[in-house]
């Protein structure tokens, strides 16, 4: 029922000041929660209440000059200014509750009434499905009876609803009419759905052993690359020469996302027009959520196990020890921070594994999505704040978690904000009539669990002995001081500070660093144990250069090189007692003074 504000002059009975009356749906959990919320904040005990189903509500509306032919689908406020419904009623109620609610109401009045009323009506239409309802109107406690006009009336039964239809009633429901607002919502839903499916494609085919290397998958990747490079050239004038390898934030990746968005927009529009604005079918939603949650679970488990058995971010070695913090890149600082604390890295990995494991079962999908949302929000912030070039990828994993959470937002709001019981959801079984199909699906799920939940920890455990904390230290591992350095006819301190080596570090993986007398450091050093060579890549202050090395005695290495007839020789001796504070400080329960260096 559409109720308009009335002129108080038309109702002489209300001419005398009376307490404002709030009429609410007595069987709606959301409305009852709102009444409890108002009671807690109405310090002046200003409002009186009555359920819309009560005789007291009908009398109050009649005195205000309004006949009640049917229950209004809204909260109703009756005050000295007349009758108010929908968003106007909510804002006027908030105005009487004092700060900060009155300030929020003042901002709410700035929103166009049509917009806020439509938003209110959308919530009102779905309040029973989202928040549930009771079989009868609520009964006030003895302490609050004086504030309820209908306290002396017997509880009123709930009005009939679509959920009350008997199971044997199979009469077809009327076809839904085309509604612009619902069509826009369906269009956005389809856009997000198609976009995510394009992003995760060709998953799950590409993760099936042996199938991921088939010509069909290779042809898909080749075709996508051709489309992206063509779009980059034709629309943006960019010639793509660098393709994703170590970085996931290349120009190619951004053009790729643009192509996904354009394709999703076109597909969503055609799909919505073909469906005449109807919502996405429930079975389509189920299948899309299964694909998204398994895709998210795969990466949560993969990255999680790489941290539980710490092989993704190894402990900082000698090549990091010599690098001044001022010359460390933000990403290098993050990797050092994570690798320096083994317990924290394991904690982060266990959090990711927990989210991934919970996503594998429908009953725990929401909990898994919430855990993944919290973990991935932190990961995304770290990637953006420390300039780690997987920003786009991690953001899409976060979007996958949000995609799984959004259908449950009303239930979460009811539980977390309105302190109302969350309504259960219906887990529709898939219509697999044949037994072999059921067993095939169960085998596929078991294979996924084995592939991503069981095999990675086993593989990563063995990798720790090759690349992780249990890896065997090479004979040349450690920090060395430069005993002597000669470049042609120039030796030691006669060399410029920018060229004079003072320390050299060799790490576990054959990487190293050189510290110069001017305080700068170059981490562009690689040692080849088989060729007995120390080389510098094509970029860097020491490049290009290749030194042959020999070890005349344990802990001593001599690097030699001949260029244009001039010999270069550098003699190194290991510093056996070199113990960097970063890796030796450890944990202390008791700290009389903070050691903050």
Image (cartoon, rainbow, N blue to C red):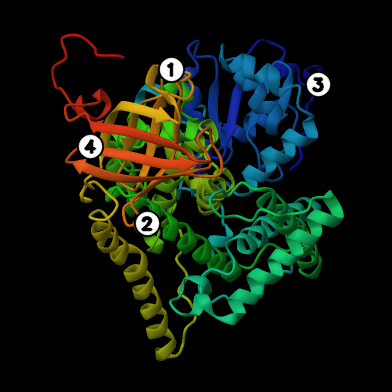
Q: Nearer the viewer, residue 59 or 312?
A: 312
Q: Quadrant of residue 261?
A: bottom right
- The tag on residue 556 is 4
- Mark carried by residue 301: 2
Secondary structure state at the residue bearing disc 3: loop
Between disc 3 and disc 2, the foreground one is: 2
**Alpha carbon of mark 4 to alpha carbon of mark 3: how far?**
99 Å
3D distance between C-alphas at marks 4 and 1: 23 Å
On the image, the x and y values in percent for residue 406 come to 55, 49
- 371 vs 167: above or below: above
Crowding at dot 4, Cα within 10 Å, few <14 / some 14-19 / many 20+, comes out as some
Which quadrant, please, contains the N terminus? Answer: top right
Contact (Cβ within 8 Å) of mark 1 with mark 3: no
Q: What residue is pinned by disc 1?
A: 494
**Mark 2 residue element:** helix
Q: Nearer the viewer, residue 379 or 100?
A: 379
Work out which residue is located at the far left of the displayed protein and give it.
590
């Amino acid at each position: 029922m559409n109720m308009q504000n009335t002129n108080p002059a038309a109702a002489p009975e209300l001419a005398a000041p009376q307490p404002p009356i709030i009429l609410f749906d007595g069987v709606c959990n959301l409305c009852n929660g709102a009444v409890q919320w108002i009671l807690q904040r109405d310090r002046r005990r200003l409002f009186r209440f009555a359920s819309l189903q009560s005789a007291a509500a009908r009398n109050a509306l009649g005195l205000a000059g309004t006949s009640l032919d049917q229950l209004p689908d809204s909260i109703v406020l009756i005050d000295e200014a007349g009758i108010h419904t929908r968003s106007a009623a909510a804002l006027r109620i908030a105005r009487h509750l004092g700060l900060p609610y009155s300030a929020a109401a003042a901002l709410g009045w700035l929103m166009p009434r049509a917009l806020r009323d439509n938003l209110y009506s959308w919530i009102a239409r779905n309040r029973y499905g989202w928040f549930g309802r009771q079989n009868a109107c609520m009964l006030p406690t003895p302490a609050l009876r004086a504030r309820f006009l209908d306290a002396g009336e017997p509880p009123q039964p709930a009005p009939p609803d679509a959920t009350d239809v008997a199971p044997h009633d199979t009469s077809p429901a009327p076809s839904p009419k085309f509604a612009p607002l619902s069509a826009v919502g369906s269009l956005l839903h389809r856009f997000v759905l198609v976009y995510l499916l394009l992003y995760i494609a060709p998953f799950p085919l590409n993760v099936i052993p042996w199938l991921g290397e088939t010509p069909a998958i290779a042809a898909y990747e080749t075709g996508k690359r051709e489309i992206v490079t063509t779009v980059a050239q034709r629309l943006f004038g960019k010639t793509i020469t660098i393709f994703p390898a170590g970085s996931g934030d290349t120009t190619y990746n951004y053009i790729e996302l643009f192509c996904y968005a354009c394709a999703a927009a076109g597909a969503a529009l055609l799909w919505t027009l073909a469906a005449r604005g109807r919502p996405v079918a429930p079975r389509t939603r189920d299948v899309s959520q299964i694909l998204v949650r398994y895709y998210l679970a795969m990466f949560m488990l993969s990255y999680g196990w790489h941290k539980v058995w710490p092989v993704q971010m190894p402990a900082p070695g000698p090549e990091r020890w010599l690098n001044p913090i001022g010359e460390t890149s933000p990403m290098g600082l993050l990797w050092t921070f994570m690798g320096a604390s083994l317990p924290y890295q394991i904690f982060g990995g266990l959090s990711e594994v927990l989210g991934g494991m919970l996503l594998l079962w429908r009953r725990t999908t929401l909990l898994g999505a919430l855990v993944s949302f919290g973990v991935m929000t932190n990961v995304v912030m770290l990637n953006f704040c420390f300039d780690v070039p997987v920003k786009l990828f991690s953001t899409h994993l976060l979007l996958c978690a949000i995609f799984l959470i959004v259908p449950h937002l009303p239930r979460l709001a009811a539980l977390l904000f309105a302190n109302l019981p969350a309504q259960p959801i219906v887990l529709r079984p898939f219509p697999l009539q044949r037994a072999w199909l059921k067993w095939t699906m169960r085998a596929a799920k078991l294979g996924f669990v084995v592939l991503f939940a069981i095999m990675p920890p086993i593989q990563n455990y063995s990798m720790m002995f090759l690349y992780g904390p249990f890896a065997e230290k090479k004979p040349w591992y450690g920090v060395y001081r430069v005993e002597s350095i000669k470049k042609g006819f120039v030796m030691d301190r006669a060399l410029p500070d920018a060229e004079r080596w003072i320390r050299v570090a060799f790490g576990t993986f054959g990487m190293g660093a050189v510290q110069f007398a001017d305080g700068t450091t170059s981490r562009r050093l690689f040692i080849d144990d088989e060729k007995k060579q120390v080389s510098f890549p094509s970029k860097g202050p020491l490049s290009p250069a290749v030194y042959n090395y020999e070890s005349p005695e344990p802990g001593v290495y001599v690097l030699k090189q001949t260029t244009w007839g001039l010999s270069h020789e550098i003699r190194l001796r290991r510093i056996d007692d070199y113990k960097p504070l970063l890796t030796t400080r450890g944990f202390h329960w008791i700290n009389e003074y903070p050691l903050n260096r």
